[in-house]
Image (tube, helix red, strand yellow):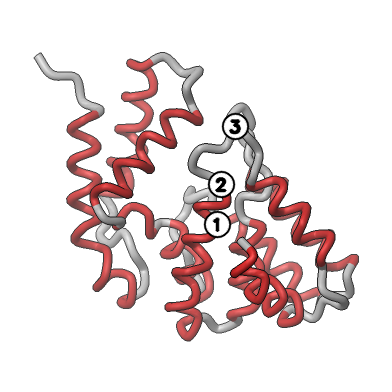
Amino acid sequence: MTTHRSSWERAWIGVGATGDGASIHAALVEKYSEPHRAYHSLQHLSECLCAFEQARFLAANPAEVEAALWFHDAIYDVHRGDNEELSAQWARSALLASGARADSAERVSQLILTTRHSAAPLTQDEFVLIDIDLAILGAEQDRFAEYERQIRREYSFVPETLFCQKRRDILASFLARPHIYSTEHFRAALEHRARQNLLRAIGAHTPHG
């Protein structure tokens, strides 16, 4: 993750925070390194930041989107239902305490809340953030298969039949959207492969016979 330190500093300065935010950065890296994380880990954060590098020109407020990416899975406990809310609260309080602009801190917090994927994104920055968070759905077949295994490990306590049912429902909800990706940038690159991956995964989670 050392290669992404410049991303952190760019986002930190971009939202008006003072200093280098080194202690917050270290705390985030520690969180993403928690042993119970198989998918929502440093690997996922790194993939998001790499995708952002290719798409930051799409954002209206790129520093806010970048900061939201750093914090979006800061709190991740599979037994909780408020991870995004807690992550958003941490981002907002950390940024405000560091002198960030209040409006930027609030927008970063709101961006993180959209990663609940409970409602369609509405703003340009939400489009970019959510497309990046969902880029894994359009990953190469081997990476997508790894992602599916990682999600299963995170929910290893859930019985197989129940997991397959819930997972199938989640994947089908993305497949049912008119478009998985909101921006033409991600739609052109990933939409077709994402739909192929989702169909394959739904089939794998569907009982046969």
Q: Residue furthest front?
A: 2
User: Looking at the picture, does residue 194 appear above or below residue 111?
Assistant: above
Q: Disc 3 marks which amino acid? A: His
CB under 8 Å between discs 2 and 3? no
Q: Amino acid at mark 1?
A: Leu
The residue indicated by pointer 1 is 45
Assess disc 3: are there few (<14), some (14-19) or many (≥20) residues with their C-alpha within 10 Å of its C-alpha: some
Question: Which amino acid does the dot numbered 2 rest on?
Answer: Ser
**Which label belongs to residue 114?**
none
Horizontal side, residue 197 vs residue 167: left or right: left
Q: Are marks 1 and 2 in contact (CB under 8 Å)?
A: yes
First in sequence: mark 2 vs mark 3: 3
Residue occupying image coordinates x 82% and y 76%: 17
Which residue in the protein does label 3 denote? 36
Cα distance between the residues tagged 1 and 2: 6 Å
Task: Give how far across and how far down residue 4 sits, in percent.
Answer: 61, 69
Is residue 184 shown above or below 83? below
